[in-house]
Amino acid sequence: MELPVISNNAPAAEGGGCSSSGCGTAPDALSHLPNHIRAKVQDHPCYSEEAHHYFARMHVAVAPACNIQCNYCNRKYDCSNESRPGVVSELLTPDQAIKKVLAVAAEIPQMTVLGIAGPGDPLANPGRTFETFEQLSARAPDIKLCVSTNGLTLPQYVDEIAKHNIDHVTITINCVDPEVGAKIYPWIFWENKRIFGIEGARILIEQQQKGLQMLTDRGILVKVNSVLIPGVNDEHLKEVSKIVKEKGAFLHNVMPLIAEAEHGTYYGIMEQPEPTPEMLQDLQDACAGDMAMMRHCRQCRADAVGLLGEDRGDEFTLDKIDVMDVDYEAAMVRRKVVHDEILEKLDAQRGIVKPKASGIPEGSRPVLMAVAGKNGVVAEHFGHAKEFLIYEASPEGVRFISHRKTELYCGGMDACGDGDMVDAGATESLLDRNIRVLEGCEVVLCSKVGYEPWAKLEAAGIAPNGEHAMEPIEDAVMAVYKEIAATGKLLPAVDSKKVA
């Protein structure tokens, strides 16, 4: 099997956690963890920014019920048109879920992690959730198990989680103040009744914090997810990050609110603003001093399959699985070979720290660049990219910042982008919308750019660059940064009056 090129060009963080110059969740960002915990995390695609380029994950939708209402959530079933949490195409029984996992793991040997994340709350569906985990532990022992929860009933299931060897748990914690929580959660279902407002939020927060502490006391790894909601919890999340770190969470994932009106959520209907990429990055950087930050989250569907950033769920619907001939014993042998090859390449890079960029004048400012990348290289045509990876280049090196989703602009090949498309009734074209998403970036790196997008990118102050196709992303970003530095554009302007 031909493996992708692996590059580890992130600068080292100083001390524990993720410094402001650290990169995503690279190994240095997790240096505060004991070695046995780092070993569990560093090859997990949902936790390691490095590993997610090479290892795949999947979610099985066996948990339809939920015990709280969130203003940003609207669960949708039999839906293949949206990519966000709470959305699934097929609800599965535990038996169907196991059949699907074995088929996916046989077909995608890079798949290492099985998670249950909905579409409701897994711990509001304990029978279905733990039956799935029990069967999978027996039939596919080489797959890691994860569960995500809102935390309301978490304390009563910590023993069950430990029993099934689930050593990674994600808790969504959006607040530690009930008054803030009342703006996010209209109600919870607790002890056979609905409890509204501040009182409901207070109970939820107490249960989340209790469950978090119980898990970490048992040595179970906890990642905390938080949804950034402008004007509601944006500043408050700094306190959340501090508290969950004190209780032992090893990773904090601050992700942007999705509030499109067509999704039917309360926030979407009420036109609650979504955070800008700059707002998200600023908050992640502010929290980074207290907690290792996850920056590569894709806010996956509850039935996602494949590498982060891709969804191969359509290949594994129940009707297609029914006609597959799966020999999982043989598949496990193949999977081990593939995993060992990937790990050998990853291990060869770990512990290698790229020195500060040479040849960059002192005082040069950082530059944001958008990359149409895949599998760690600059690989996609501008018009084919469904998301852009955002990197920051500076004299300290290159660090991953975030990803920004865009709309598929073109389905063609060489002529892509040479005829701008405008949706019926829309005030701006798909191309214009995609360029607006890249605001703040000075360069866009891709394998190829059409004439019309090239001109519009330049007009928007974004330099298109197709000269580094199939190069490792970090190498390409630094090469372009050095080219810009050579022009003198990275140094602060000289005040002629002061010189005189």
Image: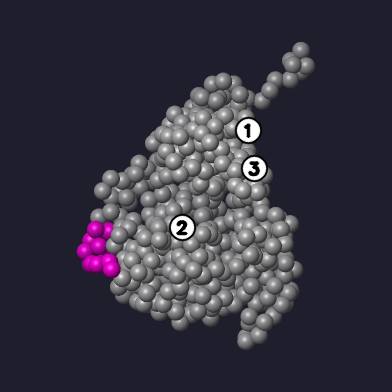
345 to the left or right of 13:
left
Quadrant of residue 473 within the rendered picture: top left
- What residue is rendered at 52% in x and 54% in y? 297
Q: Position of residue 391 (x, y in %)?
A: 53, 40
Instruction: Give residue 460's mark.
Output: 1
Mark toward the start of the polypeptide (1 vs 3): 3
Please report contact status of discs 1 and 3: CB closer than 8 Å, yes or no: no
Please report contact status of discs 1 and 2: CB closer than 8 Å, yes or no: no
Q: Amino acid at mark 3?
A: Glu
Rounded to the nearest angstrom, the CA distance separating label 1 from label 3 is 14 Å
Q: Amino acid at mark 2?
A: Cys
The mark lying in front, picked from 1 and 3, is: 3
Q: Circle 3 is placed at which residue position?
A: 428
In the depicted view, which residue is nearer to us: 280 or 20? 280
Q: Is residue 80 visible?
A: yes
- Secondary structure state at the residue bearing disc 1: loop
- Secondary structure state at the residue bearing disc 2: loop
Rounded to the nearest angstrom, the CA distance separating label 1 from label 2 is 34 Å
- What residue is rendered at 59% in x and 77% in y? 67
Q: Is residue 57 visible?
A: no
* Most frequent secondary structure within the magenta stretch: helix
Instruction: Give residue 46's mark.
Output: 2
